Amino acid sequence: MWRVALVLGLAGYDADYHWAVWERPYVIGLSVASEGLALLALGLVRPWGEVVPRWAPGLHGRRIPIPAVVIPAALGAALIMMFCAYAVLNQIFGFVEPMNENGDGFPTSGPAAWALWTTYAPLLAWGPLLAILTVAYYRRRRANDASAAARPETE
């Protein structure tokens, strides 16, 4: 939301910034990609995360292998947590030079600062929550597979 507001000039921050031709589509594309990846986390709690949906041609009804879900989800959780840790440490220690002319890399007061922090603060919980969902998915699938293997086949 913050990036979209920034691109549309609604964030009240860097109003006189001159965007390069590629920058606005890049920022919007980054937002769309991150939202799409976030929505994939729903597969960890929905049936379509275990069995390919009926609408998928050629694959419908097939069980999704556990590692095909757990490995990308675990890597995603780790990357998100590393990104958030870097962002917090960067604010504390200033690893990267500030991006604007007044010496600040982000808005420090007013509505722009509130918009930034309220839209980005939930990212701090995203990585750990994704890791918890991944572990729960793995345990549930292993338990379901084990109980299915223990059942006698009916003829």
Image (cartoon, grey):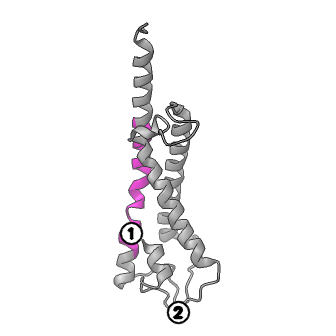
Q: How far apart are marks 1 and 2 (CA)?
A: 22 Å
Q: Residues within 10 Å of mark 2 (few under 14, many from 20)?
A: few
The answer to whether 92 is drawn above or below residue 150 in the figure is below
Left or right relative to 117: residue 100:
right
Q: What element carries label 2?
A: loop
Give, as a single range, the part of the protein colored magenta. 116-136
Residue at coordinates 53% horizontally, 42% vertically from top-left? 56
Using the image as rendered, state which of residue 119 and residue 7 is in the foreground. Answer: 7
Give the prevailing secondary structure in the magenta stretch.
helix
Q: Mark 1 points at which residue?
A: 119
Q: Position of residue 96 (x, y in %)?
A: 59, 73
Left or right relative to 65: residue 129:
left
Q: In which quarter of the image is residue 26?
A: bottom right
Left or right relative to 63: residue 12:
left
132 inside magenta stretch: yes
Using the image as rendered, state which of residue 68 and residue 97 is in the foreground. Answer: 68
Q: Can residue 130 be seen in this view?
A: yes
The answer to whether 125 is drawn above or below residue 71 in the figure is below
Which part of the image, by quadrant, shows the N terminus? bottom left
Q: Is residue 96 visible?
A: no
Residue at coordinates 45% horizontally, 15% vertically from top-left? 149
Q: In which quarter of the image is residue 136?
A: top left
> Which circle marks residue 16 in the picture?
2
Q: Position of residue 6 (x, y in %)?
A: 47, 80
Q: How crowded is mark 1: few (under 14 residues within 10 Å), some or many (20 or more)?
A: few
